[in-house]
Amino acid sequence: MRTPSAAAEPGSRAWVEELPVPADHPMAVRRRGVEMARAGEGVRRVVLRYADGGSDLIVVGPRGGRAGAVEELESAPPPPWGLPDGTPSTPYVLPISELGELGDETSWLTALGVTLARYGSQDALLGTDHGAYVLRDAKPVPASGPVLAGLLFDDVERAGEYVPCLAPPFPLTVSVMRDIGGLRLRCDHLGSHFSGEIAAQFVRHLAHVHRQVLDEVPLTEVELLDAGERERIVALGRAGRVATPGPGAVSIVEAFAHIAGRAPERVAVTDGAQQVTYGELDARAGKLARGLVQRGVVPGDRVGVCLDRSAELVVVLLAVLKAGGTYVPVDPAYPAERIAYTARDAGVRVMVTRSAGFADAVSPDELVGQEGELSAPGDGAAYVIYTSGSTGRPKGVVVPHRNVVALVEATREEYGLGAGDVWTWFHSAAFDFSVWEIWGCLLTGGRLVVVPYFVSREPDAFRDLLVSERVSVLSQTPSAFGQLMSVEHAAVGVRLVVFGGEPLDARGVLPWFDRHPACRLVNMYGITETTVHVTEQTLTRALALAGTRSVGRALPGWHLYVTGPEGELLPPGVAGEIRVGGAGVALGYLGREELTAERFVPDPYGDGRLYRSGDLGRLRPDGRLEHLGRIDSQVKVRGFRIELDEIRNVLLEDADVRTAAVVVHREGDAAGARIDAYVVLNGGSAGTVRARAAGLLPKYMVPATVTVLDALPLTANGKLDVSRLVATPAPAQQQEQPVTDDLTARLIRIWSDVLGTDVGPDDDFFELGGNSLFAVRITAAQREQGLPAVRLRELYRNPTIRGTVAGLERGGD
């Protein structure tokens, strides 16, 4: 039985937990039986270590404090705290088999150590009334850290009568109290460190672990959760609401036909001055689908699509699906080698494109087929989108029709999506956010506005488009939304903004609340392998002020767990890997059976499979998920998911590169995120290495800088020491020439201030680490100083200050 009580210190509370241990039990009658833990021996550090299958307690204490049962470790530094000045210290390894001889206090210390280790607190100190102890995983000599949890022992006659703790000695203090009735636990915690739910949960887990320690369960087999709690945690990972069933379509084609048949005259797509109605879109896609069938496309075939963002591209995507095929979108801006690899790896039957240089290529104009019936596509694969891969090559994620239909049905009613909405198509078709934009709009009867690439990179032009087209639903990465907020946006009338693609700093959207109080902001966590979105969190001003990291609860039909290294469920508040199951889980990776089996695993708590995301997160007691970053080397930069190992492997394929490392440096906000590479060369130069990489990688993956080192820095364990790979400003590309005019001098000052490095008139903006976010800031600074604004497309044509000045003097082209 647990009884909450208010503690005297503000923000703290306590619980008393009655433990079913009889008074005559040995654990209840022993008193301070741990000789090596007496207060007179000073402070020691204790570590519960799981290394090479072994489990040891490592004790650092005064030399000579205990003999016989312990083994001295060599070359251990003295503890930096706790022991009297001048006291020699020796670390010891104490085998777990010794625990039974050390009495009740050590059993509680062991239980606390196991519980904290399961909570991921291996680097946090825990205190006892004899001193301070620290847990650390797999390290022979632990480092000191902040005191997190305390363990106190006491013999009292009336332990059940709670005495307020005026000042808890540790943020979470657990008292083990003995009286004639047995044992009781009392837990005091500071509200500034722990929520009440987490503190109550912690003491409950500690009691459960201690019972297993008493029963001599091997520590590696100790369970943190009982069966009832596992069921509750599984339920927490389910959706917080139920979606209303839709028309029951099993494919995108069927769902689209339902919408188009009800209102064929309604405008489906706006592309500049061009308007395409639902009826026209359906008819044109049908003709192209028949043309594909006549060119040999059969159900299940993959069809490459390499076209610029346009109404025509929407027609082609729908045509591929109507023909029973699977579309493989390829961005025309990608390097030729990347495009060729995608087409080759996907085994496309045909490539629909207006670009030259493709085998089995056909333009949309050539795909007008004869009249005839098309067979229903069924529930096969709808698309294959390629994502960054750690092997150095992108991998194709295969997503079926039913997943996309389920995503739309999970969000339609909650967000009021319907015929009155106007959506933007802002992102590349090769980026899975576009799946949500295109089909989320067209399968709910909305109007889709194509955003040209350069408009998407110019905040003022994009703002004007939002106003003129009366856009109501806007989907953005936080980086892109930050650009929009950098310009005057009061006239924008969107009612719903959906964030995705990268982590959101909620505090950054506070100015939007001031201008658009009626607009709903929703932060969605998602992955390509789970069909764009997984969770939903509506932001409020209060959450934004608090800088919430919550991405909300699972969408209806989706579910998630937070797990440990072996796939075990972790309780709320404990960080682990996010695993996603339910309606959005993809079919797997195209042609990668082993990788599919590794990442898509059976769901031990339900039907189907789970996707192992590699993302770090934790559940809150109310079921909301907090996203804490990546476990592996995968990162997101300005919304693009990037595997750093892919960039590294491209660098290592260069004959001049002996070894390489790639890191992301983040300085300030999203605009400051940049990829930096470090290489050891056999020959060549940083410039030639970067130029080769630029020919093989998409622009967003090309390192902003390449720094040549004599050797990569390593840690004492022989691993790469990332902390010593400091961000290095890109060197000037050209020998500086005298600046003779005022405009050039002013632009040099602006560029230098924004990019944070010295800039010469002939230095390349992009080779200095520039990106579209920095370009926005340069444009804003020029306007503030009364200089002509430079649009992003002009910066691409003239990426140096000298070229920019020349373009301004010509009045642009």
Image (cartoon, helix red, strand yellow):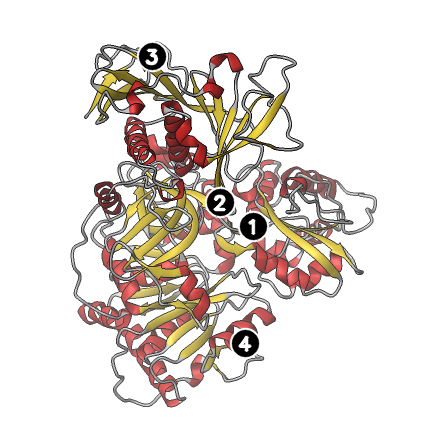
Which mark sits nearer the N-terminus, 2 or 3?
3
Q: x and y percent of residue 146 in the render? A: 50, 24
Q: x and y percent of residue 354 in the render? A: 51, 77
**What residue is rendered at 71% in x and 64% in y?**
654
Measure the C-alpha gap from mark 2 to mark 4: 31 Å
Which image quadrant: the N terminus?
Answer: top left
Q: Secondary structure at mark 2?
A: helix
- Disc 2 and disc 1 in contact, CB within 8 angstroms: yes
Image height check: is 592 above or below 664?
A: below
Q: Amino acid at mark 2?
A: Gln
Badge number at residue 355 = 4
Q: Amino acid at mark 1?
A: Ser
Q: Name the residue that disc number 3 marks.
A: 9
Q: Secondary structure at mark 1?
A: helix
Q: Secondary structure at mark 3?
A: loop
Image height check: is 100 above or below 582?
A: above
719, 345: nearer the viewer: 719
Q: x and y percent of residue 730 in the render? A: 71, 47
Q: Nearer the viewer, mark 3 or mark 1?
A: 3
Q: Residues within 10 Å of mark 3 (few under 14, many from 20)?
A: some
Q: Name the residue that disc number 1 marks.
A: 772
Q: Amino acid at mark 4?
A: Ser
Which mark sits nearer the N-terminus, 3 or 1?
3
**What residue is rendered at 45% in x and 32% in y?**
98
